[in-house]
Image: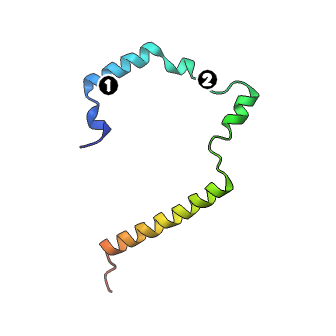
Amino acid sequence: MAGTKAAWTKERREKQRRIIQETKPWLKSTGPITKEGKAVSSQNARMSPELARIDAELKKIRVQALDLFFRKRWPKMPR
């Protein structure tokens, strides 16, 4: 099986676990604290109207491409 899962041996996972337990990153990751910081981070996933339009168009194209791919690969059988 290819991919990142194959790269993580038992030894590597154990080493990573020890590093995480020692550094405890969850204690340092607080996220935004001030009202201004919270306001800024709340807009992280927001898209401009132009980008939202492009994103919607790309989704339509992906659906059409997958439809064509599957139709070509597995044509409907006549009844």
* Residue identified by numbered label 1: 13
**Which quarter shows the C terminus?**
bottom left
Residue beneath the point at 46% across and 15% down:
23
Percent across and percent down for residue 53 are: 62, 60
* Residue projecting furthest to the right: 35
Numbered marks: total: 2
Question: Marks 1 and 2, how far apart in space?
Answer: 25 Å
Residue 33, quarter of the rendered image = top right
- Per the image, label 1 sits on a secondary structure element best described as helix
Residue beneath the point at 36% across and 22% down:
16
Marking on residue 3: none
Marking on residue 30: 2
* Residues packed near mark 1 inside 10 Å, few (<14), some (14 to 19) or many (20 plus): few
Compared to residue 33, the image places residue 47 above or below, namely below
**Which quarter shows the N terminus?**
top left
Residue beneath the point at 39% across and 17% down:
19
> Coloring scheme of the render?
rainbow
Q: Are marks 1 and 2 in contact (CB under 8 Å)?
A: no
Pick the front one: 38 or 13: 38
* Residues packed near mark 2 inside 10 Å, few (<14), some (14 to 19) or many (20 plus): few
Q: What's the residue type where badge 1 is placed?
A: Arg
Compared to residue 18, the image places residue 4 above or below, namely below
Compared to residue 25, the image places residue 8 above or below, namely below
Percent across and percent down for residue 26 are: 53, 21
